[in-house]
Image (cartoon, helix red, strand yellow):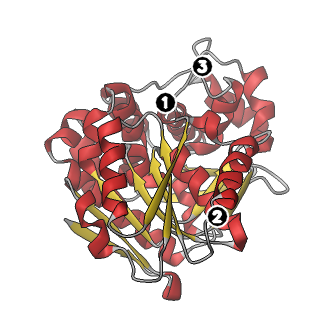
Amino acid sequence: MKAHRVELGADSYQVVVGTDILDAIPEILPSGPINRIAIVEDAGVPEPARDALENVMGEIAEVRRIAVPGGEQVKSLASVEKVLEMLAQWPLRRSDLVVGFGGGATTDLAGFVASVYQRGVKVCHVPTTLLGQVDAAIGGKTAVNLAGKNMTGTFHQPCLVICDVATTRSLSEDHLRSGLAEVIKYGLCFDSALLSLLRDDALNAFQKDPEAMVSACVRIKAEIVAIDTFDKSVRRHLNYGHTLGHALELATGFEELMHGEAISIGMTFAAEMSLGMGLLSDEEVNLHRQIISGAGLPVSTNVTPETVIPLLTRDKKFRDDQAWVLLEGLQRPFVKIGVPQDAVLAAYAKVSHDG
């Protein structure tokens, strides 16, 4: 079991990574008067795991479970209203605790609910997917979707994050591969040693030592969040591949592409754009394609440019012009404001089935 501390002064907390560590939660949960715990749980998590967490949390306080559908569709204002109503009718008090248990969409929803209920209650995240463990549950970003991805949200840091890699054993291979897209992002943008591990067979590398791989990603994200909590500077680099990726998710109704699949296409696109601007070499772009394809993830799409390009302006990072996260060499991300439309279209042609 390894603990990473997100250093945020009074809001600092631990992200604990290990195997079969749910039983340790009562020992490591920050002390305080907690009488009731509301577990917002992904209905897709196997029932034995949900029962196990209820039993563990029952050692601390009275527990109520609130099951929500898994996946991006749960990130809606209707879901927020439903969960808030249940908390208010119980009622959960300001000194109590919300727990987000499931994939990244579930922890996003639970975090948002906790941030607005009675103007803010404590939240603990127990992500059960690889995507949630390496990215979504860490850093205090909460959100639901409106006309675009994550368009309504808050910053609300958890008091604890528990990444029990044993929970990933029940994931389908598709869900594991989707989570690997975010791991690949960390390697391309921040960690050459991690990138080397992923080079030949990312899925096999993860399965050999899931704790080490999750821990490597958590360390990187914890350091970045501590530097840039509110996404003003270096934290924006974590959005490599996400500008196009989110637009593709929106264009396909959050149904045809898993998040990691959309981000994989987005990273390939960002690499092609970087190549077109003379920032990356052909070899570095080919490495993107090799690692992403080797992980069983897509590097191209059949969504037409006429469909997806107009959706780019719905990106929450959009100000007066589009913000792109590009690479000027591996592990050297930066934000580029405004790229000529012809350069965008030329890069998109490289990831289009019709290109």
Which residue position holds label 3?
352
Q: Which amino acid does label 3 sit on?
A: Ser
Q: Is residue 207 left or right of residue 52?
A: left
Is the C-beta separation of discs 3 and 1 under 8 Å? no
* Image-based side of 155 in relation to 5, left or right: right
Relative height, residue 65 to residue 248 (above, below): below
**164 and 300: which is toward the camera:** 164
Among numbered discs 3 and 1, the one appearing first in the sequence: 1
In the image, residue 10 lies at what x, y percent? 51, 88
Q: Quadrant of residue 89?
A: bottom right
| In front of the other: 347 or 92 | 92
Q: What element carries label 3?
A: loop
Alpha carbons under labels 2 and 1: distance apart: 40 Å
Please identify the quadrant where the N terminus is shown. Answer: bottom left
Residue 91 numbered tag: 2
For residue 210, say whether it is visible: yes
SS type, badge 1: helix
Q: Where is residue 282 in the image (x, y as percent from the top left)?
A: 43, 35
Q: Is residue 352 above or below residue 39?
A: above
Which residue is at 45% across, 54% downward?
135
Counting residues from the N terminus, which is met first, the one under dot 2 or under dot 1? 2
Residue under label 1, please give it. 261
